[in-house]
Structure formats: structure tokens, C-alpha cells
Image: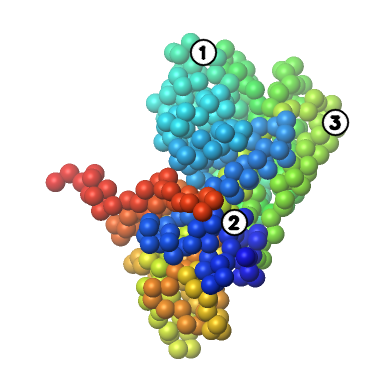
Amino acid sequence: MSVTDLEPAVWPMTAARSAEGVLTLGGVDVRDLAAQFGTPSYVLDEVDFRSRCTAWRDAFSGADVYYAGKAFLCTTVARWVAEEGLSLDVCTGGELAVALAAGFPVERLLFHGNNKSVAELARAVDAGVGRIVIDSFEELVRLAAAAERAGVRQAVYLRVTPGVEAHTHEYVATGQEDQKFGFSLASGAAAEAVRRVLGLPALELVGLHCHIGSHIFDTRGFSLAAHRMVGLLGDIRDEHGVELPELDLGGGLGIAYTAADDPMPVKEVADGLRAIVERECAAASLAVPRLAVEPGRAIAGPTTVTLYEVGTVKDLPGLRTYVSIDGGMSDNIRTALYDARYTAVLASRRSTAEPRNVTLCGKHCESGDIVVHDVPLAADLAPGDLVAVPASGAYHRSMASNYNHVPRPPVVVVRDGSARVIVRRETEDDLLRLDIP
């Protein structure tokens, strides 16, 4: 039975409390998860993940939905994405390697990245990757050469910087002029890139791409981006007599990390983006291109809970209470990096003690090693208790590190009362394996 401290928008769909007040995920008691797999652990709800894939697929019927693998990717997740009918966005040779190892259909792969190496481009071309997103003039030349060597005509997008300011953290805003990605629309670089690609027989320009940022909660930025991107499509038609058939508006939709967040339903997002593009195309007398979107956080984020064990409780009278857990910034860098906000609950028992605001902190040698700021937890919280932090599925495991030589946690999948590891916990032997005496 779910209870009030499990805000539905924040927790996976199967999260619940047992009659004893213990958190269960996918029908599995978190105490059993901790005993079997240890802590910290990322606990991923398979039903929730697959349901979000199908929700995006259905809402964007007739469009291409590329799951953004940078949010979280492993071979099992790549197979789920394929099975649920989505395509996959990779942005490094390593992510491409995971997709290929999983047997992902290569024609449904999209390859991003602002500095793809010659080797990475050659591998993508040789593998038959469906779309490669060109990010610079240098890459344009490299990719054309790779396609010529392989004797193929490679389908490509051009990444365009539309000059749109997304209302998000500066580190994840990617649509404004002053940033490393893409060809500037305002400077004319995008138009020049179009001219160069159209002049290269080894490359087939099939569409344009833009991405204005991450963790966005409305479509206003997308509306302006679509207006400018459709304007460029019109300019291409007028100059070259070509109507490009595809338009990728990127990803970036936000999720609920706390009850204060109010993400848009995916159906509303889909309807809104379609209406925006159709309106702009009608005004420009253009055929409506096939849309593509790239949700990552919106699929993976809410599916996962990080399970920690409390190690110490330190009261600083008149200041705050620090509750130290057995993980921290090595398994969740987002709080330190973006000042991200989370919630947390006492997961291993029911408490009748009044809650008090505490700072949930990690075990690393940094004063900024905070997981959750000012979260209300039971005043009798004690060493050995389990604490759960929801919305841990995006950019947690994928950005995890070995700072202070802490091994990275496992990813444990729960479903229908059973649990299994899909990414094992690192060991000290793993940490030492690359050392050369």
C-alpha cells in the first residue's frame, strides 16, 4: 500500500510501503535488497522503465523517439529500448559499443557528439549507424572521408544552435549561441554547413537537429526553436530547392525530483510539439517533416531509487544535523555539480518520531559531498537504517566515479517480486586492474 510520503510523481510506479512501513520496490523488500546486493545500490524498476518507453512511443506515433543513452545505458537497457520499439541515441564510441554489444538495430541508432574521432566515425559508418549528427566543419570533412572509404552514402543531420535560452542550469543549457555544440544559426554557419554537405556525394542530408537544454518544464523554448528551425528549412528550400524530410528537436524534458516539480505529461508534450511544427510549416508553406525527439531523463530518471545505509548522525547544535550515508558524490554528482534537489525517506522501518530537517551527506573528502539538502527524516534515524533517494535513474550511474577509490554501485533490476543484477558492483580488484606496478 502506498502512503503519503511516497509522492507518486517522484517514485517508480511499483514503489509502496509494506504493512510494517518498509519500502518495497517491484514487490521486493528493500531490506532484502540490501542484504543480498549491499548498499549503496541503484534499484531500477523494469516495469516503470518499459512503461515510460511505451508512453513516449505511443504519444509520438509517426515520429522517431531516440532514447538518449547518456542518461543511463547498459546492454540490458539497450535491449529493453529496442523491444519497446524506440530508437537509441549514442554520443561516444563507448556508448556505440554498448549498443552494438546488445545487438541494437543499427538503422535505429543516432550518433551524437561534438568531437567524434576519426576512429569513432569510421566505426559508426562501418556498422551502418542510421543517422550521424554532424557538429562541426572539421567533422563534416572527416565523416565524408570515412563514408567514401566505406563506399556508402551516410545519412546525416546537422546540429544547429538556434539561439534559444532554455530556463535551466547553465551547465545543461545548450541552445544559446555561446556554447560548444553545433552550427550557429545567427552567424550563418548553419547555412554554410548545409551548402557544404549538399556538395558532398558521400553524405546525404536528411534533416536538422537542435537541442536547447535539459530539465525543462514547458514548451516555450521549443516553440521558439521550432520557429527558427523551420525558418532554416524554408531557407534551404529557397536556396537549394530541397525540402529536408526530418527535424529532430532533441530532448530535455524535466522530471519530478521533489513534490515541488511539475513535469508535463508526455502526451501533452507530443501534442504541443506537433502543433508548433505544423503551425510553423504551414506559415512557411513547407511539408511537415518527420519529427524526432530524444528523451533520456524523462524515461530513465523516475525509474530508479538509490538505496543507502546510514553510517553516522552528527548534530551541530544551532546549525544542522548531518546524516552520513555509505555513498555520496561518487554515485550522485548532480547535487554538487548542479545544486540539484532531491527527497529521501527512511526505508527500512516505520518511525513514529517527528521528522526533522537533516542534510544527507556522503563519505567523500569534500565538504560539498551532499546528496540531499534539508530533507525531513525521522528524528530517531540511526546508524544501520536504510535511506532511499528516488529519481536516481538519469545521470547517476552514467556520471558515477571512483573518487576516493570508492567502487561504483551495482544496478539491480526489480520486477514482480524478484531482483537481479544487470550491472555488477565494482570491487577493489577492479580499481587495481589498470594499475601497472
Q: Give the mark, 1 or 2, whose residue is nearer the N terminus.
A: 2
| x 58%, y 60%: residue | 15
Checking the image for residue 330, the label placed there is: none
Q: Residue at x 37, y 58 (%)?
A: 36
The image quadrant of residue 207 is top right
Q: Indicate the amino acid at tag 2.
A: Thr
Whichever of callouts 3 and 1 sits on the residue coming sooner in the sequence is 1
> Which label sits on residue 14?
2
Q: Residues within 10 Å of mark 3 (few under 14, many from 20)?
A: few
Relative to residue 23, is residue 427 depicted above or below?
Answer: above
Mark pair 3, 2: CA separation: 43 Å
Image: 360 above or below 198: below
> Residue at point 49% right, 62% down?
29
Of residues 382 and 116, which is closer to you in this image? Answer: 382
Query: Residue 187 at what x, y percent from top left?
Result: 64, 35
Res 152 label: 1
Contact between labelled residues 1 and 3, with CB atoms less than 8 Å apart = no
Given the image, on which type of amino acid does mark 1 rest? Val
Which residue type carries mark 3? Ala
